[in-house]
Amino acid sequence: MRFEAFEKTIWLATPTKRDDELKYIQEAFDTNWITTEGTNLVEIERQVCEKVGCKYAVSLTNGTSALHLAVKLAGVKEGDTVFCTDITFGATVNAIIYEKAKPVFIDTEYDTWNMNPLALEKAFELYPDTKVIMVVNLYGTPAKYDEICSVAEKHGAVIIEDAAESFGATYKGRQTGTFGSYNVISFNGNKIITGSGGGMLLTDDKSAADKARKWSTQSRENAAWYQHEEIGYNYRMSNIVAGVIRGQLPYLEEHIARKKAIYERYKEGLRDLPLSMNPYDPDTMEPNFWLSCILIDKDAMCEQIRGENYTCYKSESGKSCPDEILETLAKYNVQARPIWKPMHMQPVYRMNDFVAIDDEGRGVVTSWDSDNKFDVGADIFQRGLCLPSDIKMTAEEQERIIQIIRSCFE
Ligand SMILES: *Cc1c(COP(=O)(O)O)cnc(C)c1O
């Protein structure tokens, strides 16, 4: 071992505490608003609307419940097809399944690692009746919204934007969380702003926001007693959680700046290695840089074979692979993570259709077989890795991490 292990684990992304969270929680206690109503909720909804530039924000227990309500608002019914980003966190797809709809996964493009607009267009040829598209901004990088919105418009489809990871990112100067009719952000503990949990549904449609509020509090009708005309949920955020978020929100831009500095340091420190960073288009996009990732060049990959829950690789000089780097970092007490495994490769979703683009630019429905050469998502999963992106990591700590990664290629 040529480096010392870190005494304290360096994490992928953990909450960064600020000063005012406890103040706002205390305020909720002092005024006895220890419930799902109160000033903290009012205040964070106001601030998020102002920041993002949307008309309505509804605070919910988490991003997943916000996604579920978004799917309902989009009118998704049992058996409907919903086009969905393929490289994402499972919550995106689960929300579609809660309404018994059928996700069809759309392959990824290499420019932003998000939904490929061309594959989306092809998917409409194959499933012309589809009315809803679920788009994710992976790791804080916006998807290609000009292209995706124009395909959606052409086919009269509604967009749900899962901006859980991209709060604060912009595309052509416009904040993510505004490109869909219904949009979602998350305040989960590892996101750029946290409430320990929590999420929001964002929309410009007043009746949608009203419905979401009503559904989230058990769908109570306006009556003296508990009167119910529709099914409800207990999805409303607590005013205590909102206090944490209220203390965090003023630091969004600072957190983005620090995440960006981390990204730039990796880029600089790893630049002569045979790999690239998670990409974006600097002319149109300003990501929030939530997670810094790398993609190892094809010809610099040593052999790596992944089963369902084990992996096997063969070290080779001058080459490496994500699992070798993961294992090496772990030895030094550093947490990294594979790229989110594509949904079409997940045991629970691999029977669902997956639309990719073949060599001749045709849309093809393919299987989960990872040997499929048209499968961009499987390729990024095979060669990519999320690096520690915690904003409390110091430049010196990051420099050591960079050296450890470099040693894997020796
Ligand atoms: C975190 C996340 C969610 C879920 O948010 P929770 O607040 O944890 O429920 C949904 N989609 C994506 C892409 C996420 O990263």
Image (cartoon, rainbow, N blue to C red):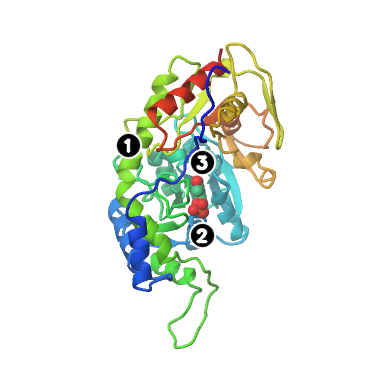
Q: CA distance from mark 1 to mark 3?
A: 33 Å
Asked if 75 appears above or below 334 in the picture, the reply is: below
* Res. 191 in view: yes
Among numbered discs 2 and 3, the one appearing first in the sequence: 2
Three-letter code, disc 2: Ser
Q: Is residue 57 left or right of residue 215?
A: left
- At x 43% / y 71%, what residue is drawn? 35
Front-lying residue, 34 or 85: 34
CB of mark 2 near ligand 1 (< 8 Å): yes
Q: Is residue 43 left or right of residue 403?
A: left
Q: How many marks?
A: 3
The residue beneath circle 2 is: 65
Tell which tag, 2 or 3, sits nearer the viewer.
2
Crowd class of label 3 (few under 14; some 14 to 19; many from 20; radius 10 Å): many
Front-lying residue, 356 or 313: 313
Question: Where is residue 47, by image quadrant?
Answer: bottom left
Pinpoint residue 245: horizontal percent, then vertical percent.
38, 56
Among numbered discs 2 and 1, the one appearing first in the sequence: 2
Give the quadrant of the C terminus: top right
Q: CA distance from mark 2 to mark 1?
A: 29 Å
Secondary structure of residue under mark 1: helix
Asked if 216 appears above or below 97 in the picture, the reply is: below
Three-letter code, disc 3: Leu
Secondary structure of residue under mark 3: helix
Q: CA distance from mark 2 to mark 3?
A: 26 Å
Pinpoint residue 250: horizontal percent, then vertical percent.
29, 50
* Res. 205 in view: no
The residue beneath circle 3 is: 120
The residue beneath circle 1 is: 257
Among numbered discs 1 and 3, the one appearing first in the sequence: 3
